[in-house]
Image (spheres, rainbow, N blue to C red):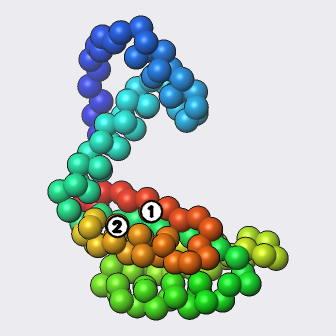
Amino acid sequence: MAVTRFGVSLEEELLKALDEFVVENQFSNRSQAIRHLIEKNLVEKKWKCDNVVAGAITLVYRQMRHDVRDRSAKIQSQYFDVVLSSQFFHLNENNYLEIVAVKGPSHRLTELSEKLIGIRGMQHGKLVMSKVD
C-alpha cells in the first residue's frame, strides 16, 4: 500500500498527549500512532453502523464455579450464528480463561458479550471487535 506524507498542526498539549500515547503503546513513531487512532475510529464507526465485524470475548472466572462454564456454553448455543469457536485455558489452579471467537453484526456480538460478562461468578470479561473487509 502506498504511503502519502502530509503535515499536521497540533496544539502543544495535543502533541504532548500524542507523544505520551506513542510511549504508552510502544509505537515506533507518531505516524504509527495516528494510523492506529484512525483505524480505531473507523472500526468504532462500523460498530455503530451495525456492520459485520469479527472479534473475541475474553472471560475470566474461578474454576470452582462449574455453573459459570455451563451457563456460558448455554448462552453461546443461543448465538450459534455468530460464535465461531470457544477455547478454555487453565490460568492457574483456581482460574479459567475462556476466549470466544465471534463474527457477525456488531449489535449481536455486543448483546452476546453482555450476557456472558453478566453471568454470576464471572470475574472479568471484555469484547474486542475489528472490522471485516
Q: Position of residue 47 (x, y in %)?
A: 26, 57
In the shown orientation, is residue 15 left or right of residue 104?
right
Q: Residue furthest top?
A: 12
Identify which residue is drawn at 61% across, 76% down: 121
Mark 2 crowd level (few <14, some 14–19, many ≥20, 10 Å Cα): some
Label 1 SS: strand
Q: CA distance from mark 2 to mark 1?
A: 7 Å
Location of residue 13 (image quadrant)? top left
Label 2 SS: helix
**Position above or below: 121 against 125:** below
Q: Are marks 2 and 1 in contact (CB under 8 Å)?
A: yes
- On residue 127, the disc is 1
- On residue 110, the disc is 2
Badge 2 amino acid: Thr
Q: Position of residue 106 (x, y in %)?
A: 28, 65
> Which is nearer the eye, 105 or 32?
105
- Report if residue 81 is visible in the image: yes
Quarter occupied by the C terminus: bottom left
Identify which residue is drawn at 52% across, 88% down: 71
Identify which residue is drawn at 37% across, 36% down: 37
- On residue 88, the disc is none
Q: Position of residue 102 (x, y in %)?
A: 39, 73
- Report if residue 100 is visible in the image: no
Quarter occupied by the N terminus: top left
Q: Residue furthest left?
A: 49
Identify which residue is drawn at 20% across, 62% down: 50
> Which is nearer the eye, 81 or 117?
117
Badge 1 amino acid: Leu
